Amino acid sequence: MSERRIVIYGEAVLREVSEAVDEINQQVKDLVSDLVDTLKKAKGLGLSAVQIGVLKRVFITDLAAVDLTETIRVFINPKILETDGEVELEEGCLSFPGIYQKIVRPAHVKVKATDLEGREFVLEAKGLAARAILHEYDHLEGTLYIDRMTPLTRTLLKGRLRKLAKSSCAA
């Protein structure tokens, strides 16, 4: 389909809770295609529909850049079944260009979702895959990775975040 503009921090849609997908129709398939094109161009590891301005419970991950055995995964109406452990790693977000910070997240996740063919699946992931899934899932809930930063880190980033929000409103 086509690459779309990535929503930048400061745009209100990022704080919205996404709506469930009722049926996997051509519109949803086109949305996933646009997510794939946009993610490839941006060279990211994951992208949620809300990040291209669509409030639907859909996200993709593509960890092929860091693991050659990985491929693009599509998650429609995902539900987190369980998490375990805790790990702190540097994390970034395509909606926060140039900002990378250490974030504590669960080390393991078990997620249930539907694929593009309408089949439900359960996936257990750890490491970077778990982090990507949890990060994108947060977007569907209107939660941003800066919400997971320590208060001190957020305070230190306040100027950069304000500048980013101001530039997104001017766009």
Image (cartoon, rainbow, N blue to C red):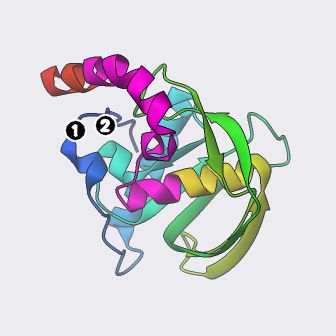
Q: Main SS type for the magenta part? A: helix
With 160 as the anchor, is 116 left or right in this view?
A: right
Q: Which mark is residue 126?
A: none
Q: Position of residue 122 (x, y in %)?
A: 69, 78
Q: Are marks 2 and 1 in contact (CB under 8 Å)?
A: yes
Question: Where is residue 3, by image quadrant?
Answer: top left
Residue 9 sits above or below residue 125 on the image: above
Residue at the spot 35% in from the left edge and 35% down from the top edge: 6
Q: Which residue is mark 2?
A: 7
Q: Position of residue 93 (x, y in %)?
A: 49, 35
Residue at the spot 31% in from the left edge and 37% down from the top edge: 7
Q: What is the three-letter code of the residue carrying label 2?
A: Val
Q: Which residue is mark 1?
A: 11
Residue at the spot 85% in from the left edge and 48% down from the top edge: 69
Residues in magenta? 136-164
Q: Position of residue 84 (x, y in %)?
A: 74, 67
